[in-house]
Image (cartoon, rainbow, N blue to C red):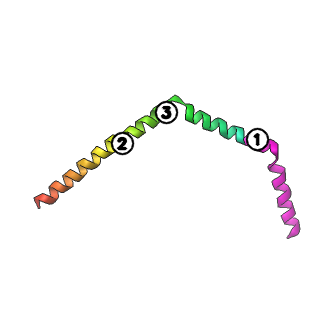
Amino acid sequence: MLKSLQKIQLGIKKYFNLDNIVDTSVDIALVVFDVLSSPILIVMRVIRWFLNEFVLVHVKKFIKFTVRLFIKTE
C-alpha cells in the first residue's frame, strides 16, 4: 500500500511541475482571450441577448394570451 502511494505521489510530482503548470495556464488564457475577443462571438452574444430579452418575452405573452382566450371561451 505504501509503495503504491509513493508511486502515485512520484507520478503527480512528475506531471505537475512548474513548466507544465505555466504551459497549461498560458494555453487556457489564450483560449479564453480568443473566445472573448472574437468579433463573431460578440455578435452572437448580442443576438442571443436580444432573443432572450425581447423575442421570448413576446412569445410568452402571445402564448399566455391564446391560452387565456381558449379558457374564457369554454
Residue furthest front as drawn: 53
Residue furthest bottom as drawn: 1
Left or right of 15 on screen, residue 38 = left
Image coordinates of residue 67 in percent, x first then y, are 20, 55
Dot 3: what SS?
Answer: helix
Identify residue type, mark 2: Glu
- Sequence-wise first label, 1 or 2: 1
| Residue 53, label in figure | 2
Identified at 28% across, 46% down, the residue is 59
Left or right of 14 on screen, residue 71 = left
How packed is label 3: few (under 14 Cα within 10 Å), some, or many (20 or more)? few
Q: Are marks 1 and 2 in contact (CB under 8 Å)?
A: no
Identify residue type, mark 3: Ile
Q: Which residue is mark 1?
A: 22
Q: Which residue is mark 3?
A: 42
Identify residue type, mark 1: Val
